[in-house]
Amino acid sequence: MNLLVLLFPPVVHLNATFTRVSNNATVIPFNANIPDCGNQPKTDNNCPYKDIENKKKEKKITRKTPEHLLNYDRCYQLNDEVEYRIYWSVSLPDTIMMAISIPATNESEKWVAVGFGSIFPGMNTSDIVLGYITPTGTQCVRSMTAVNFVGAPIDTDTVALQNTAVSYINGWLTVEFSRKLSDGHNPIPLNPPVMPGYSVIWATGDNVLTQCSGKPKYHSHRGYRVINVMYPDTVFDHSRLCTN
């Protein structure tokens, strides 16, 4: 019979004494009334939960819609974060009047744009309308297109814009224009198929331009939405309707 012998080194026992040291911390019962720290800094010792930031959602400022925008037949808010709104009315057989609007702190702070028919996240071949107000008060509404998948758009006459205007009223920067539905690389269909649908891209950014030309600064926000100009209820939830 084979025996397996395991050898272990001797065990050394360490004698140690541990002493509990109080840090004089305030113990808060689970069901205690926790005081509201309010806007106190995190270093305020009177706040027992000073290291936990009290995150309260900041209520968005309610801005009254400019009166003239109420004349459009449709208005939807495409993005809640930047409160990007798009208004439109269709005049058959081939014209659409449109406005795009975002909040801004002053008239020349931002640019706002909409692009028709591109496949997000790409921009190539999209028909873009970009508008802003220069620091000297010049209103700029530019017809543009994107040549590459990404990158700044360039000016073009592919889509002829009419009735252009830029306004800053009640804190809303608004770009308005009309165009033919049939113009451009991506004509706007009256009733596109549900799949894949007809999409628009939207974008906003800080304005650094001092004239109605030049390369706009890279967008700070952008996104896309499928749109149906004749039957928007088929692609928009009612929660997207403009409310004020």
Image (cartoon, grey):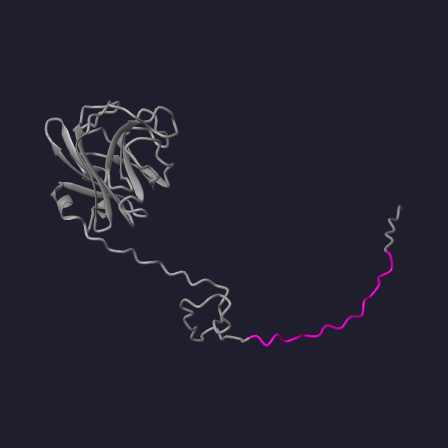
Q: Is residue 8 above or below residue 163?
A: below
Is residue 24 found inside the magenta-colored segment of the image? yes
Asked whether the viewer can see residue 195, the reply is no
**In the displayed structure, does residue 205 sit left or right of residue 198?**
right
Q: Position of residue 53 (x, y in %)?
A: 45, 62
Is residue 70 found inside the magenta-colored segment of the image? no
| Count of numbered circles in the view | 0
Query: Front-most of 13 and 59?
Result: 59
Residue shown at the point (50%, 64%) measured from the top left: 51
Q: Position of residue 23 (x, y in %)?
A: 61, 74
- Residue farthest front in this picture: 136
Q: Position of residue 64 (x, y in %)?
A: 19, 53
Residue shown at the point (33%, 31%) measured from the top left: 214
Q: Which residues are magenta?
A: 9-25
Query: Front-most of 216 and 8?
Result: 216
Asked whether the viewer can see residue 235, the reply is yes
**In the displayed structure, does residue 1 sit left or right of residue 212?**
right
Find residue 8 and report its image quarter: bottom right
Q: Is residue 161 above or below residue 139?
A: above
- Residue farthest left in this picture: 92
Q: Is residue 109 above or below residue 93?
A: below
Q: Main secondary structure of the magenta part?
A: loop
Q: Is residue 32 above or below residue 222?
A: below
Residue shown at the point (17%, 29%) measured from the top left: 179
Q: Position of residue 122 (x, y in %)?
A: 36, 29
Find residue 134 and report its image quarter: top left
**In the displayed structure, does residue 146 sit left or right of residue 18?**
left
